[in-house]
Image: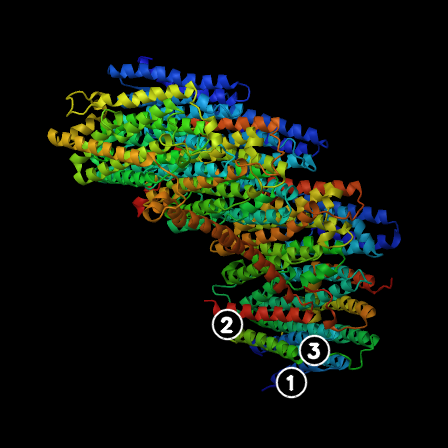
Amino acid sequence: MVPVLLILIPLLAGIVSFFISNEKTARSWALLASLITLLVSIFGLTVLKDPSNLAFETSWLGSLGSSFSVKLDGMGQILCLLTAVSYPIIFISTWHAPFNKANNFFGLMLLAQAGLMGVFLSMDALLFYFFWELALIPVYFLCSQWGGERRIAVTFKFFIYTFIGSLLMLVGILYLYSQTPGSSFAIADFYNINLPNNVQSRIFWLMFIAFAIKMPIFPFHTWQPDTYEQTNYATTMVLSGIMVKMGVFGLIRWLLPVLPAASYAWGDTVSTLAIIGMIYASLIAIRQNDLKRLVAYSSIAHIGLMCVAIFAETESGMQGVMIQMFNHGINIIALWIVVEIIERQFGTRKISELGGLAKKMPALSILMMVVALANIALPLTNSFIGEFLMFNGIFGSTITKYNVVFMVCAGITIILAAIYTLNMIRRVFYGEANELTANAVDIRTNEKWILVAVVVLIFVLGVYPQSMLDISSETVNGILKEADITPYLIGK
Amino acid sequence: MGITQILFWFLSALVLVSAIMVVINRHPVYSVIWLIVTFFGISGHYILLNAQFLAVVNIIVYAGAIMVLFLFVIMLMNLNKDMEPQKSKWLKLVGAIAGGCLLLVLIAALKDIDIKDQVAETNTGEIGLIENLGTVLFTKYVIPFEISSILFLSAMVGAVIIGKKE
Amino acid sequence: MNALIISAVFGVIMMFTGIFVKQKPVQHTMAIIGVALLLLINILEMNGIVFFKVNTEGFMLFDRFALLFNSVAFGSTLVYFLLSARDMEKVGHYFADYVALIFFILCGIVLVASFQSLLILFLGIEIISIPLYILTGTSKRNLKSNEASLKYLLMGAFSTGIMLMGIALIYGATGTFTTRYMNFGEGPSALAIAGMLLMFFSMAFKVSAAPFHFWTPDVYDGSPTVFTSFMATIVKVAAFVGFIRLFYDAFGSIHEDWKLVAAIIAACTLLIGNITAVFQQSVKRMLAYSSISQAGFMLLALLAFNATGKEGIILYAAAYSLATIGTFAILLKMNDHSFESFNGFARQQPLLAGANVVFLLSLSGIPLTAGFLAKFYMLKATLEAGGLMWLVILAVIMAAVSVYYYFRLIQAMYFKEGDGNAIEVSSGFKIMLVAVAALLIILGIFPNLLLNWLYF
Amino acid sequence: MPINYYIILSITLFVIGIVGVLTRRNTIIVFMCIEIMLNAVNLLLVAFSKMHHLNQLATNPTAGTEAQLFVFFIMVVAAAEVSVGLAIIVMLFRNTHSIDVNFLNRLKH
Amino acid sequence: MNNVLDLVWLIPFFPLLGFLVNGLGRKSLSKTAIGFIGSAVILASFAISLFVFMEVNNGNTHVAHYFNFISVGKLNIPFAFQVDQLTALFLLIITGVGFLIHVYSTSYMHDEPTDHYGRYFSYLNLFVFSMLLLVMGSNLVIMFIGWEGVGLCSYLLIGYWFKKPEYNKAANKAFVMNRIGDLAFLIAIFWIIAKLDTTTFSEIFSQVDKLSQADITAITILLFIGATGKSAQIPLYTWLPDAMAGPTPVSALIHAATMVTAGVYMIARSNILYTMASTTQDIIAIIGLATAVLAATIALKQNDIKKVLAYSTVSQLGFMFLALGVGAYTAAVFHVMTHAFFKALLFLGAGSVIHALHNEQDIRNMGGLRKYMPVTHITFLLGCLAIAGVPGFSGFFSKDEILANTFMSNPVLYVIAALTALMTAFYMFRLYALTFLGKFRGTANQESHLHESPSAITIPLIILAILSVIGGFIGIPEVLAPGAHWLHDFLAPVFAQSTAIQTPHHADHTQELMMMGGLSVLIITVIIWAWSRFSKYQPTAEPETGIGKVLENKWYVDELYDTIIVNPLHRFGAFLNNSLERSGIDALVNGVGKAVHYSSRQVRWLQSGQTGNYILLMVVSMVLLFVLQFFLKK
């Protein structure tokens, strides 16, 4: 029941929201819905942990071999929790942000949430694709309608880019479907397909490109900084906090176990791309003058690491990815909250025009400091756990010859991350205030408390990550078992 | 070479020449006349093939009704002068070449078909007679026949809609 | 069969209504009742309740596929009448006659969907085409309409000639016009192949597949918009159903011989339709090109030559027709057909804009709309056919290109500020439009509601 | 006569019709050329009809009838088409005083 | 709780508490309260540390396991503290010196606004917390947490005066350089995990024989690179002098007494690995010595009081690494301890001077402070004597032990090390003389305000001075008093594994005594020379030339790094951002869109509007398809 509720609550609430005319009511309604979703998600982790509550299946497109099959497994738990946690954070932090036609805005936001939940819960390939697009469409509208000057063109590029990717993925799914014994979309049947290596490779690229665009992986990333730059903050948070996880999630659930031989064969190539992207994005971030673009590039670097860790196919790396997906989500949302506050107050995101905020906005500065430190994976913050496990996984990978090279090259980015993050902190928060920032006032209560909540979360997960690692360990082991390439190697 | 062969070659030459004349003649009225000649030639072929009903219908419907309609329209528009602007030479050439290629390709493809030595029965064979055709038309083919009435109805309605002055 | 008779009868009735009943609302109601009756009769026939039993002498076969498609066509026509009948009145003085012609066209559609003999196919296509030549030219003072009509006539007649030559050659090779008796032996003769190709070309012309599509944009653009809507949807999918019937039933045994040509034509259609649509400045013309690109997708069903393709074409017919009719219904209310006229539309008519978004999403094949599943079936069928991965990938890339021009309209409606282009629509229209949008979504989630009819 | 002769004759006639369509600008002549194409088909059908009749004389004495009836229907359709076509041409002529095909180029691109 | 040492969590807990209370209450608490809390928590930790030390001294070493920090597959990283002799010693140093510096700070930082004062103490407490984690961690990961934590605090405290851009830059530099080392540290951890599936020290050390020689060498080198970052060794030392931007007590605590010795602690902790990797040991010895020499030469020409001390720290750290490199772990730890005392003393003394002179740091503008600041002067002198290695003072014992061991390992290294020790004596007394002797060279205004610092400053100075003097007596060399090396015996269990496989070599006592004596004489000579030369110093306007200029500019190492690393990096980033990203990849993506648009524009010309053309195109296509079907297709 839980997974169905997780999809249905935001879906219905979203539809209702379109018909609420009062802005305040729409806001409260959306917040209420998101809080209920959060509650359900937490229940799913605690009191309703019984497996019978976490899976739901009913016939749907019977003739096509597809069923409405949703299940909350370990990875789903984490990502649904992320989605459920992020939404109240987003709603509260943007409580005072003016939205023209707020009812539509919140309706679309909730629809996107339903889509995201669906993506993370689907155990059926067709259903997965359905939700994949369902999540994208509202975001397209959100980005295009509320944002910067160039939003329409930029969002359009993003949309078409992503759409090409998803269509290619659809072709891949279809092909796999045609190869299942009983023509079924069920994930279990997908896992049982045994394709020859060259066919796997072709399907691998079809599907990988979809995920690569979503994550994004170099060189498919160029939509991202533009989109983040032009989009309103609430949507950017959804995009960067949750939606990019769809790509990572897709790799883990729908690529690695389904096409193990191709993942093995192309793992090095993909990892190389991801690492090039990490370093590339970090170097660009060093030179960024725009806060939003800086965060965007930093996100590319972080996601790249997840990609490498996935293709390392080790338990440690995979667990790292699991926890890091959650961490990256909340951390980047917090970063956006801060950037939003800055832009709202000073009307600019240019680092060079800011400075000296620490004096005027101490609360913001301290909270930002913590978030920034989490962004560079300082120990005792949540990201450290994730990155530690991922790096460890990469280093310990036995399926690639280049594990050490990968780890070291990827590791360079933790240095680069420190450079750009601290430079940004230095130039924005430290130094003397200039005339623009001289009259700054500190943050509002809602923002403060929501950031405090995030910071608490950052530390809790940084000090006691095992709570989260336990959730996903079973799923990770299952996936790694499916992804095991030993049978193929024997075949050679 | 029997009389049938002679007639066949004569009629074929007539049909082709008159058809070419239709295409190359600049004067619309002359074209119509040549077209009527073509139809007569084809009717001649029908007779040669002992398809008397079609031969008659061809002359009545085509050479009679349809061509008169054409002629009538041309007169109505007063197009009997040589007023047709010519297409550019190049376009004509290209059109002729394209048609020639099509002809070449089709003939090249069809010249060696397996039924090429089969014969189309001339002079004999009863199926083309009105009696036989009528029987089949009003028994087995009654449904297509009825359906063609719908076609005529719609053509009639259409012609009225289009032709009526507003 | 019953539908054919009722349709013809209603055509005649409408002719006389035009003469004897001058009140437009009555004519209007008659038209809607007529189509509704058609739909009802057809559904009854699907359920085995037949009023007139006619021996078709093997000329026609009313199997489930034909009947289901008829239902889709009648249903779409009903929607079309409900949404756009009033706009038909604005075209000229002969509303009742237009409706009569449409009923005759429906006769043709029934024929094309159920023919077993090439003769019926030929008659069906002509019964469809001739009224269309006229409907295209109904805006008599409008030079564009005249021009479109004549162009359509010339090219249509030309393609009829091609088709007849094809039929003749096939008759020469097989000695029969009845599709199921056609026997091409082991290696089909050149005669048969040539005939088959000629038929392919002429059918490709009817469904506006590239490179035989040239008439489409001009004719669709020139016709009165309300008839473009009908032409681009119901008529086009009917032609497709005929196409599929012909090539599945008659030429199925020589599938290997037309696969390559079909694949090339499908690829050309997808490419040309989508790419040309990108640059269009008029929504109407864009929709014309979009109909070409959608034809490219539907060609995949033909190419696939399997049961999925047949299922898929029905769904595609429904999804494509409903969405396009809906979009055209809104376009009909606009003062001009440029993209700019839609600027700010969402603010002014949120409900219509919302419905239009559903239509456009369906056309671009976004999940949760029927359009997605329709495309999905096409891709699935093609993949099942095997060896056509390249075409599938081309198709999805072109689908992404199609998003470009469909979403331009969405952008105009939602994200661009407009100067109000105030339009008046009745609430009935709104409700109807929303209902159509809802139908598209329902079909997009539960396609079996429609497709199950094919089987049980 | 060998059927090949008829095939070649018909196809030649057919192509002459096509060439006419391609090379002439006068709408009415274009239309007439299309009629030539149809007549080529008719001739071929009758020839095939007689060929099949001869081939299947033993088994099916009415073989070939259907083709001749088909020709009949083609004539019927052609007549209907011509009537509508000429009506359209007249309508256009009334509006533009021209029946030049090249003049029909308002709709393009 | 079956072992009293399970309570060691209290030691880091108190500073953490102090951090939270001071950090959150920095606006509401008074300065007195902040200072009190800040110092008291450290004192509490110190008290517990003393207790722990007693326990350990009684032979009770213990690993206190609290909870599973990370447990993934076969890898289990517990959150556990290990208390043994080495830890106990460091606990005392950290909390002891830390407490003194906290007390000192209550006065030194008193002019700061209250909330910044609170911020300062919370950072300082956080630092102590992190440092304690570092030394108490029972595995590499907990150690790494502390390792990065101290780096963070160092960053925060260097940039404490965040309004000054150059201070922030220095802070960033410190952090980034540390990060480079940290990366190597991390890789070493992963390497160990990959081979042994554990990070716990005891498990690693008991399984060393499972590691191949190459593994050990690689791991040790990587760990050492980590140490070069934290402990400011070549090539990652340049941050430390810049780190003097922080408040002086911070320099004393972090950049002299404790944090920078973390590298030494880490290597001492993993001594068995190093003992087994002779290549690494050689590298460490060479780098340590090179750092010592380099820093000493630079210190000769520095004019900023804190910079001199900073380079001296680098140099002393070099000595410690030299000791580690030659396998003299006890000597290294010994030097860590004595260095903590006298360097903290020197920094605090310098702070006292700076405080009195109102943030004047240039020694050329000082002089003659002897009479104004007697306590500071005396304690500073004692510190200088200690660091110079004058017999009897603590520095003498520890440095001598290092030199002796170096000599046994390689006489060449010994000679260089001895020369460096002489340089140390020289620049320290140059510093001393310029600061306290001669006439005051500052402004009259400054002179009028000159005064001795308050007791909160002087008392820590005095305590540290005492420790600097007597601290060496816990490790009296074998030659002077056999069996009196208490420290050696105390730490023996920690290094037992290494000792077992090290080849013991005992130099002959006479030789050792001769060297000790000779060097002492030389040092005293140098001191006298420096004293006499610089007590009569007069400022000159002439710029330095030749080698002096090179030294004054620190061998241009910073410039070198800028040229070969930092600037290219920035230029490359700019190239990627401006060229590759915009005109390369993104242009390619947009180009696809433009290409579609362009082809759309072109293709629509096919739609010419001419019926004739349409039919022509159709016929041509038909011909082509016929040709394909009949003649091309197989």
In this rendered view, identify the residue nearer to me: E297 or C402. Answer: E297
The picture places residue E156, in percent across and down from the top left corner, at: 45, 31
* Amino acid of disc 1: Phe
Q: Which type of secondary structure does the marked residue at label 1 adopt?
A: helix
> Does mark 2 fall on the same chain as mark 1?
yes
> Who comes first in sequence, dot 3 or dot 2?
3
Q: Quadrant of residue E3?
A: top left
Q: Is the Cβ of the residue at disc 1 closer than 8 Å to that at disc 3?
A: no
State the residue position of label 3: B87
Color style of the picture: rainbow
Q: Please check whether the numbered discs 1 and 3 fall on a single chain.
A: yes
What's the residue at 52%, 20% (across, down)? E25
Q: Residues within 10 Å of mark 2 (few under 14, many from 20)?
A: few
Residue D106: image quadrant is bottom right
Is residue E190 shown to the viewer in this render? no
Three-letter code for the amino acid on which mark 3 is drawn: Lys
Q: Is residue C311 left or right of residue D23?
A: left
Query: On residue B114, which mark appears?
Result: 2
Q: Chain of mark 2?
A: B
